[in-house]
Image: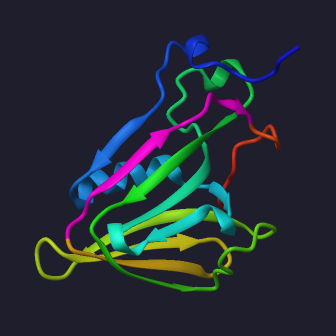
Amino acid sequence: MNDDARFEDGGEAPLNLGALDADDLTIISTLVQDAVFPASEMRWLKREGRFALLLNRMRWEDAGANRHVPERVQSVLVFSNVQAVASQGVPKGDADTVLSLLHIAFDESESPSGQVALTLAGDGAIRLTVEALDVTLKDVTRPYVAPSKKRPTHPD
């Protein structure tokens, strides 16, 4: 028997969202909170000015969450117009290290450019210098049962 959920089960479609300002980014940040990914699944395509992550995110938007166990879905998070990438506490390319994304914020410096901060669990962080904010979040697989069968919680 296949325990994986299907989009059709909840009458929901995969996400395909964009963010062009800080308010839009707040929505994407909420949807990717507690997403996990191997350090090897992040790429900076310098010539193309893109930074991308392949995430396993919680389906926080799942309207049927009270009917079944928590679900995750693989999603691609892409930042365009990236001029520079800096990080701390992030081992690059290590397939064994799993990172957890907690929050994304945009600090506009000289409109429309600024800094995007990706805060990771365990004091890790990634900073993107962008010419203009342009972010895409797209689900690329069907939902699957979260391995822990629990939703992450955070102390108040």
Specify whether residue 139 is painted magenta. Answer: yes
Model colouring: rainbow
Which quadrant does the C terminus fall into? bottom right
Quadrant for the N terminus in the image: top right
x%, y% of residue 91? 68, 81
Q: Position of residue 101 (x, y in %)?
A: 58, 63
* Residue located at (69% from left, 50% from top): 152
Of residues 100 and 82, the one drawn nearer to the viewer in this rendering: 82
Residue 8 drawn above or below residue 142: above
Instruction: Identify whether 29 is placed above or below 44.
Output: above
**Residue found at the very far right of the displayed protein:** 1
The x, y position of residue 35, in whole percent, is 61, 53
- Residue at 68% x, 77% y is 122
Queried whether the magenta region covers residue 28, the answer comes back as no
Q: How many numbered marks, from 0 up?
A: 0
Q: Looking at this rendering, what residue extends furthest in the front direction? A: 47
In the figure, residue 116 lies in which quadrant? bottom left
Kindly indicate the quadrant of the structure image that contains residue 133.
Answer: bottom left
Q: Is residue 156 left or right of residue 98?
A: left
Judged left or right of residue 92, residue 28 is left
Identify whether 146 is placed above or below 43. Answer: above
In-front residue for pair 51/18: 51
Residue 131, quarter of the rendered image: bottom left
58 or 74: nearer the eye? 74
Instruction: Measuring from the top left, give residue 99's x and y in whole percent.
Output: 68, 67
Left or right: residue 73 compared with residue 144? left
Q: Bounds of the magenta span?
A: 132-145
